[in-house]
């Protein structure tokens, strides 16, 4: 990147700090200001009033890393003041807010990208490549499971407050898996869902089961999003006409989801072909999805290219699905 880009971060909790760490690694990116009234910020970067960020014409882009209910507010403000905006998931806490963001994007014509980070894992990139190449034919069905265990401490956090978070485990974590299913299989016109709060007995869901159908392509999908699994688990299976791909585990900074292992093979439906010896296994030991993601954002700014992953249309389609599920 030939040009220096001044960047501001709004929200300096866990994700804001992670974004800061990643951005510092990228050449020609200058962390200019950080705003968060509740967190300790490096003194030279601290900004006491968020308006100073939006009024400062030296700032090219902002990263919105705030609680969910503030995402659309800061995104719209950023677009209004001619800043390129990268916003964490969920895009908004409801569909109405998402439609407002779309209007602002169209009016002010700046770059807008959302943090659907899982799309940028190299295992997911390879799966998408194989699907698009039609090496294994068309998708028949897909199944996603994404879950974790939470303690009572979770309910001392803003994520458990529906007025701030917008919901429970689906919008908190399951949104990533829903985005991947939409990314691979898309345009679902049949949606069946059940949600419950059978263990924690709160006003947010601790389990969601979803069935999806793309009638045009005749693809069936299912998703289970849970916070009562008592172990962290990520599993994505895609079965196609000529083969299959299964991704078990996801490489993260905490290693909570185990090893990121992608298995793929051609169909072997007839005995004795139905064995495990012809499968190929790839282990992804390093997670550089965060760097890949922000580089995609800055590349779109410097080269005036379209954002292909995590754009506002992806976000709108996802929030339409979540709205129907809820």
Image: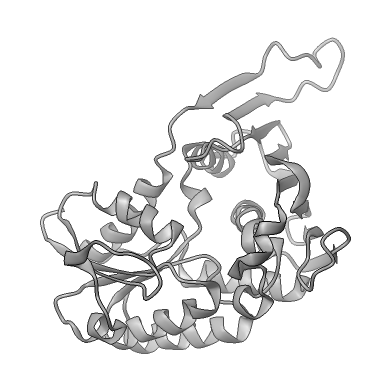
Q: Which of 284 and 33 is in front in this view?
A: 33
For the question of whether residue 308 can be seen, the reply is no
Residue 151 in the figure: left or right of residue 270: left
Residue 167 lies, in percent from the top left, at 69, 71
| Residue at horizontal 70 percent and vertical 62 percent from the top | 170
Residue 104 lies, in percent from the top left, at 41, 87
| Residue at horizontal 28 percent and vertical 84 percent from the top | 49
Q: Which color scheme did the rendering employ for the protein?
A: one colour
Q: Nearer the viewer, residue 80 or 15?
A: 15
Position above or below: 122 against 86: above
Residue 257 lies, in percent from the top left, at 61, 37
Residue 257 in the figure: left or right of residue 300: right
Q: In which quarter of the image is residue 319?
A: bottom right
Q: Quadrant of residue 5?
A: bottom left
For the question of whether residue 130 can be seen, the reply is yes
| Residue at horizontal 59 percent and vertical 39 percent from the top | 134
Position above or below: 188 against 150: below
Q: In which quarter of the image is the C terminus?
A: bottom right
Position above or below: 264 against 287: above
Q: Which of 148 and 46 is in front in this view?
A: 46
Q: Quadrant of residue 64?
A: bottom left
Q: How many marks?
A: 0
| Residue at horizontal 68 percent and vertical 43 percent from the top | 138
């Amino acid at each position: 990147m030939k040009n220096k880009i001044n960047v501001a971060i709004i929200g300096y909790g866990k994700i804001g700090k992670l974004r800061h760490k990643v951005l510092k690694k990228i050449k020609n990116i200058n962390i200019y200001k950080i705003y968060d009234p509740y967190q300790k910020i490096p003194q030279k970067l601290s900004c006491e009033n968020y308006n100073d960020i939006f009024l400062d014409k030296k700032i090219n882009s902002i990263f919105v890393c705030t609680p969910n209910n503030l995402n659309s507010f800061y995104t719209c403000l950023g677009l209004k003041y001619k800043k390129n905006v990268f916003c964490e998931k969920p895009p908004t806490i409801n569909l109405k807010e998402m439609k407002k963001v779309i209007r602002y994007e169209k009016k002010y014509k700046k770059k807008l990208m959302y943090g659907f980070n899982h799309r940028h894992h190299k295992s997911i990139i390879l799966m998408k490549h194989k699907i698009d190449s039609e090496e294994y034919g068309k998708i028949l069905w897909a199944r996603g499971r994404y879950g974790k265990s939470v303690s009572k401490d979770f309910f001392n956090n803003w994520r458990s407050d529906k007025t701030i978070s917008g919901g429970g485990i689906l919008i908190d974590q399951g949104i990533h898996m829903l985005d991947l299913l939409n990314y691979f299989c898309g345009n679902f016109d049949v949606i069946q869902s059940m949600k419950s709060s059978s263990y924690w007995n709160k006003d947010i869901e601790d389990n969601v089961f979803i069935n999806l159908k793309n009638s045009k392509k005749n693809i069936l999908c299912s998703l289970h999003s849970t916070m009562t699994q008592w172990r962290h688990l990520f599993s994505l299976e895609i079965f196609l006409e000529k083969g299959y791909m299964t991704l078990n585990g996801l490489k993260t900074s905490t290693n909570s989801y185990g090893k990121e292992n992608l298995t793929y093979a051609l169909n072997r439906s007839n005995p004795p072909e139905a064995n495990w010896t012809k499968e190929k296994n790839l282990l992804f030991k390093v997670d550089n999805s965060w760097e890949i993601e922000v580089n995609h954002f800055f590349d779109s700014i410097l080269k005036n290219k379209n954002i292909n992953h995590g754009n506002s249309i992806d976000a709108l389609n996802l929030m339409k699905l979540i709205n129907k599920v809820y």
